[in-house]
Amino acid sequence: AAIWHRASLQSLLRRGESIWEFEQNGNARADHHATGFYATWKAVVPYQGILSHHVVEKGLWLPHEKWIFQHQNIGCDFSRRQTLRFPQVLFYHCAQFTDKSLNLFPWRLKTRIKRAMKRLLRPLFENQFSRMNGNTLSEHQRSSK
């Protein structure tokens, strides 16, 4: 959840950029924003799912959350987006577990550890990192137009 000053958010947006590209590129732009931004390390507005805090990851349904929504019969159109494949789900949950485990450390140390882990793991898991960064989704979006 986020609370934004509208003009500040608009200054970070770029025409033609998908929400997933904004998630990555907007963070980099925010780092250079003159007034800075504030964030919390703990949820201020808790919204927990069964295994994650949301139902869609990079534009794809998390399968366990999709199953829950299907059985609630609330009118979701499941043909509008694909479902995350099992290897990506496993990778996603491992990353979530690792991130939560690192909460034992002060935030600066946690940030340095995460950066080092990404540097070490990226060569081994390039495809998974690429998919989790939304690259596959962008290709899918282009092919579906």
Image (cartoon, rainbow, N blue to C red):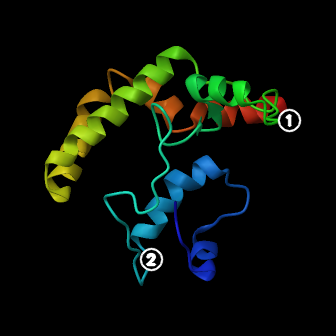
Q: Locate residue 93, reporting x and y percent.
A: 40, 28
Q: Quadrant of residue 63?
A: top right
Mark 1 secondary-structure assignment: loop
Query: Where is 31 relative to 16, above or below?
Result: below
Query: Which residue is labeled 1 in the image?
Result: 145
Q: Nearer the viewer, residue 28 or 85?
A: 85
**Left or right of 74 on screen, residue 134:** left
| Dot label at residue 33 | 2
**Left or right of 31 on screen, residue 140:** right
Query: Where is 90 relative to 47, above or below?
Result: above
Q: Amino acid at mark 2?
A: His
Q: Along the polypeptide, which appears first: circle 2 or circle 1? A: 2
Q: Residue furthest right?
A: 145
Query: Where is 31 relative to 111, above or below?
Result: below
Q: Locate residue 2, reporting x and y percent.
A: 52, 65
Mark 2 secondary-structure assignment: loop
Query: Where is 97 relative to 5, above or below?
Result: above
Q: Nearer the viewer, residue 54 or 8?
A: 54
Q: Quadrant of residue 83?
A: top right
Which residue is at 59% across, 37% downward? 55
Which residue is at 13% across, 49% downward? 105
Which residue is at 34% across, 27% downward? 94
Q: Residues within 10 Å of mark 2 (few under 14, many from 20)?
A: few
Q: Spatial distance from mark 2 to mark 1, Cα to Cα?
A: 34 Å
Q: Residues within 10 Å of mark 1 (few under 14, many from 20)?
A: few
Q: Amino acid at mark 1?
A: Lys
Q: Locate residue 145, reporting x and y percent.
A: 86, 35
